[in-house]
Amino acid sequence: NALEYYLKVLEIAPRDVKIHHKLGNCYFILKNYEKSVEAYKRFLMIHSRDFPAWNQIGAVYIELKDYPNAIKALEKAKEGLPDNPEIWINLGNCYQFMKEFSKAIACFETAIKLSSNAHSAWYSMGVLYYDHMEFYDKGLKCFEKVIALEPGNYQAWFRIGKHYQNKKDEGKAAECFKKAVEIDPSFGEGWLEFGKVLFATSKFDRAIICFQNYLSLSEENNFSTQSTLIINTSTGHEVSTNSEVFQSLGKCYFETNDYQKSFEAYKKALSEASDPSTDWLKIANRFEKKEAFEQVAQCYAVALEAKPNDYLIWKKLGISSIKAGYYEKALEALKKAYELYPSDSDISYNLGLVYTYLGDLE
């Protein structure tokens, strides 16, 4: 690979300073930012007037979140390249991360004046207005300007979609998210938000496709956000983002009457919960209203994994199994319920009912 041969050059000709510049570029691409900085430093010790290299090391410092050193390097780059919009954009990003917003805006505005096609500056300024200053209309105008300059910028389409999503305008949001994933079908977050707005407007079949695409990309590209926890507002439990997606898939399948797929999605959604029994009882009630008794029984069976000595769940498992026509399973569950709480007449009644169905009257 390139890195191997560049290191070989350094070994053979250690005084060849130019190779440090190549190494800096190579390490940057490989995201080894510490080594990239060291390589650029060695190069700049000799070539201190190489202003593009100062810009490059500034960009590396940004990746390392070392903004003071990034600013020093970029100011040096600006001395020789005052009309380079990329340097001004990098400076603006530094000031944005340091929460010096007025300086950041001034840098982005300078970059825009220097280039008629500075879509990166418009985008960065939009992020600043929208995420950090809460000037949502100004942020929206910046993202719209990006689209005007670069119609294929999927991130700008996504940002505009999020704006309309927050405004509860699901129709416009869906159009923007659709555009974003058409431009870049591997954009997982775009599929996720597209699915959410389709779900919110009861377009469940299309929402299923979006959520499935997101989950497929999550698995393929290992950008699963399982470590990112959110609060499930209906239960108060902490769940991962992917858990939220499986919850939404479960609801979509439920609304399209595919109850088995709905159950399977809910099972994946709750696989990480420490005590999912309460959730399973609620889901069981939903299936029962649809007379999907097979799935009702499955919900109670999973709930028992967390609460194996809850006689009431055993009883409900037995009764739902009767309704689903699974008499042997019903008998097993009701016997367990009777063992745990023999004083419940309802358990005895349903045991009698099961034995009757099984033809065992004595």
Image (tube, grey):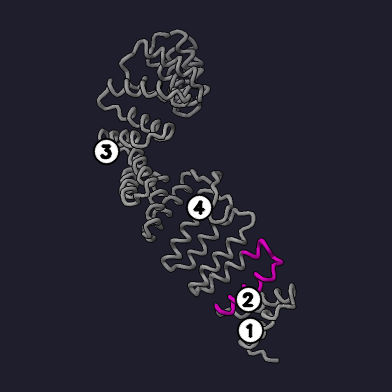
Say the numbered circle drawn on residue 293.
none
Q: Could you tell me the amino acid type at mark 2?
A: Gly
Using the numbered discs, state the Cα–Cα distance from disc 2 to disc 4 in whole angstroms: 30 Å
| Helix, strand or loop: magenta stretch | helix
Residues at circles 2 and 1 in contact by the CB criterion of under 8 Å: yes
Mark 2 → mark 3, Cα distance in angstroms: 59 Å
- Amino acid type at circle 3 is Pro
Instruction: Please tell me whether residue 139 is drawn above or below residue 198 in the rendered image.
Output: above
Q: Position of residue 88 (x, y in %)?
A: 36, 20
Residue at disc 2, secondary structure = helix
Task: Tell me the residue at 48%/64% (across/down).
Answer: 261
Q: Return the residue at label 3.
A: 151
Magenta segment range?
A: 303-323
The earlier-in-sequence mark between 4 and 3 is 3
The residue labelled by disc 4 is 244
Q: Relative to 356, is 108 on the left or the right?
A: left
Quarter occupied by residue 307: bottom right
CB within 8 Å, label 2 to label 4: no
Asked if the stretch drawn in magenta spans residue 96, the answer is no
Q: Do the residues labelled 3 and 1 touch (CB within 8 Å)?
A: no
SS label for mark 1: helix
State the image coordinates of residue 130 (x, y, percent, origin top left).
39, 35
Q: Is mark 4 on a helix, strand or loop?
A: helix
Mark 4 or mark 3, whichever is nearer to me? 4
Image point (46%, 14%), residue name? 72
Location of the C terminus (image quadrant):
bottom right
Crowding around mark 3 (Cα neighbors within 10 Å: few <14, some 14 to 19, many 20+) is some
Q: Which residue in the protein does label 1 denote?
A: 354
Q: Mark 2 points at which residue?
A: 318
Give the residue type at disc 1: Val
Q: Answer with mark 2 or mark 1, whichever residue precedes in sequence.
A: 2
